[in-house]
Amino acid sequence: KQEVTQIPAALSVPEGENLVLNCSFTDSAIYNLQWFRQDPGKGLTSLLLIQSSQREQTSGRLNASLDKSSGRSTLYIAASQPGDSATYLCAVSYNQGGKLIFGQGTELSVKP
Amino acid sequence: NAGVTQTPKFQVLKTGQSMTLQCAQDMNHNSMYWYRQDPGMGLRLIYYSASEGTTDKGEVPNGYNVSRLNKREFSLRLESAAPSQTSVYFCASSENRGFTEAFFGQGTRLTVV
C-alpha cells in the first residue's frame, strides 16, 4: 500500500533556529512530491513542488530535497520565525495529474 | 485571483439531510478532487475527476456522489448525511499534463448532528 509518513507529528523551536521536517513514502516510484502549509482553520497553500527527476527545490528560506531511492524528502526552514508556525504537509503523486497521497503533517510552533 | 472557491464555508446538517458542496476553479485545470480531513487521519481522497465528464472513486467514496458539471465546477453531494461525515472538506484542482502543483480551496467545515 502506498503510504506517506511525516515525523515528528509536532515540533516546537525557538525563533531563529534552522529546522528540518521529514517525509517518507513507501513506494519510491513517485511522479512528484509537494509540500504544503496549512494554517489553523484554513486551506492548504502549496510551498514547493519537486519533480521525480529533481533533487531539490528552493523558495526563499525554504529548501525541499528528494531522495527517491530511499523514499524520503526533507523540508528545511532557515532562520525560523513565529509566522512560520503552521502545519506542514507532504504529499506524493504517482502519475501525471494524479491524486495526491498525504502524510498526516508536522505541526510546527516557533516561539518568539 | 480567485483560484479554487468552495461554498459554503460552514454547514450544520441533521442526520439524514442532504446537501451539495460546490467547488469552482478559474485556472482552466483539467483535474479536480474532493478530499476530507479528519483529526488523526490526514487528508483522504473521496472522488476525483481527470477531465470534464469523467469521475472516479478515491479512498473513501461511500456516502458521496459527485458531478463534474463543466470544466470549472465539481460538486460533492451527501444524499443522507451521517455523523461519520462530520469533517472538513477540501476541493482541489491541478493540470493533468506535466509536473504541475495542486491548488486547494479554503474548505467547508461540515457538522452532522
Image: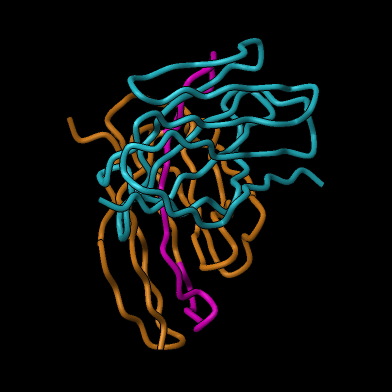
Observer-nearest of B63 and A31: A31
Say whether residue B26 is left or right of residue B98: left
Label tally? 0
Work out whether A63 lies above or below B62: above
Work out whether A70 lies above or below B109: above
- Please, which residue is most extreme toward the top here? A53
Give, as a single range, the part of the protein colored magenta.
B78-102
Chain represented in orange? B
Q: Residue at x 37, y 19 (%)?
A: A59
- Residue A70: x, y in percent? 79, 27
Residue A97: which quarter of the image?
top right
- Residue A14: x, y in percent? 36, 48
Chain represented in cyan? A
Observer-nearest of B87 and A53: A53
Q: Residue at x 61, y 39 (%)?
A: A22
User: Magenta stretch containing residue B100, yes or no?
Assistant: yes
Q: Residue at x 57, y 38 (%)?
A: A91
